[in-house]
């Protein structure tokens, strides 16, 4: 039972989630992990090495960071039954945060921002099949 609306200015009452909302949140979390694992396996099958999984910087989080043939790949993963819906979910604001986070990560590497890199966008369908769009951010 919800005891307080999130927008309620009275912060003295504790907020509790409904069991359905908590269950949906857990389902989404594990669905996301499964999608990321599927994409990681796809890169590994092509000879890529996973450097980081869910790397967090000050600007945000990058789902996967891979090195593939000497190129550092920053990959955003979405899970969706519909490819179009997943692409629409990637907002310009999110792309900006991903680029800022990637710049922060590059700062930890010996060559810094001179490191050869690209941004990929991956969508995993309801059957666990990944579709990878290399340089998938385009002009978003």
Image (tube, grey):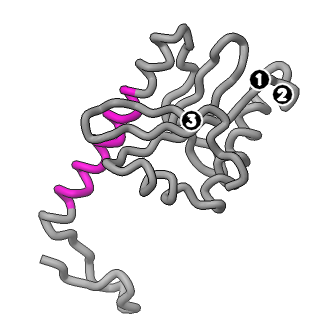
Q: Secondary structure at mark 1?
A: loop
**Which residue is the site of mark 1?**
109
Q: Please, which residue is most extreme toward the bottom here?
A: 9
**Which residue is the site of mark 3?**
133
Question: As drawn, is 60 to the left or to the right of 85?
Answer: right
Q: Position of residue 121 (x, y in %)?
A: 55, 39
Q: Position of residue 28 (x, y in %)?
A: 29, 50
Question: As drawn, is 124 to the left or to the right of 102?
Answer: left
Which quarter shows the N terminus? bottom left
Question: As drawn, is 98 to the left or to the right of 24?
Answer: right
Q: Is residue 32 magenta?
A: yes
Cα–Cα gap, marks 2 and 1: 5 Å
Vertical order, 32 against 140 (above or below): above
Q: Position of residue 92 (x, y in %)?
A: 65, 60
Disc nearest the viewer among 1 and 3:
3
> What range of the chain is rendered magenta?
22-38
Q: Secondary structure at mark 2?
A: helix
SS majority, magenta: helix
Q: Residue at x 26, y 77 (%)?
A: 14
**Which residue is the site of mark 2?**
112
Vertical order, 52 against 56 (above or below): above
Nearest the eye: 112 or 48: 48
Cα–Cα gap, marks 1 and 3: 25 Å
Q: Please, which residue is most extreme toward the top here?
A: 47
Q: Residue at x 67, y 36 (%)?
A: 135
Question: As drawn, is 18 to the left or to the right of 89?
Answer: left
Q: Position of residue 137 (x, y in %)?
A: 65, 46
Q: Residue at x 59, y 28 (%)?
A: 65
**Mark 2 burial class by Cα count in 10 Å: few <14, some 14-19, many 20+:** few
Which quarter shows the C terminus? bottom right
Sequence-wise, the earlier of marks 2 and 3 is 2
Q: Are marks 2 and 1 in contact (CB under 8 Å)?
A: yes
């Amino acid at each position: 039972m919800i005891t307080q609306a999130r927008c309620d200015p009275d912060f003295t009452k504790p907020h509790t989630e409904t069991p359905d909302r908590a269950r949906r949140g857990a389902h989404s979390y594990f669905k996301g992990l499964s999608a990321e694992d599927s994409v990681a396996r796809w890169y590994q099958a092509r000879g890529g090495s996973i450097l980081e999984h869910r790397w967090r910087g000050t600007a945000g989080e990058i789902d996967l960071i891979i090195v593939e043939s000497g190129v550092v790949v920053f990959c955003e993963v979405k899970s969706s039954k519909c490819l179009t819906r997943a692409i629409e979910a990637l907002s310009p604001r999110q792309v900006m945060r991903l680029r800022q986070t990637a710049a922060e990560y590059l700062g930890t590497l010996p060559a810094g921002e001179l490191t050869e890199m690209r941004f990929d966008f991956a969508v995993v369908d309801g059957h666990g099949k990944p579709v990878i769009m290399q340089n998938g951010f385009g002009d978003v």
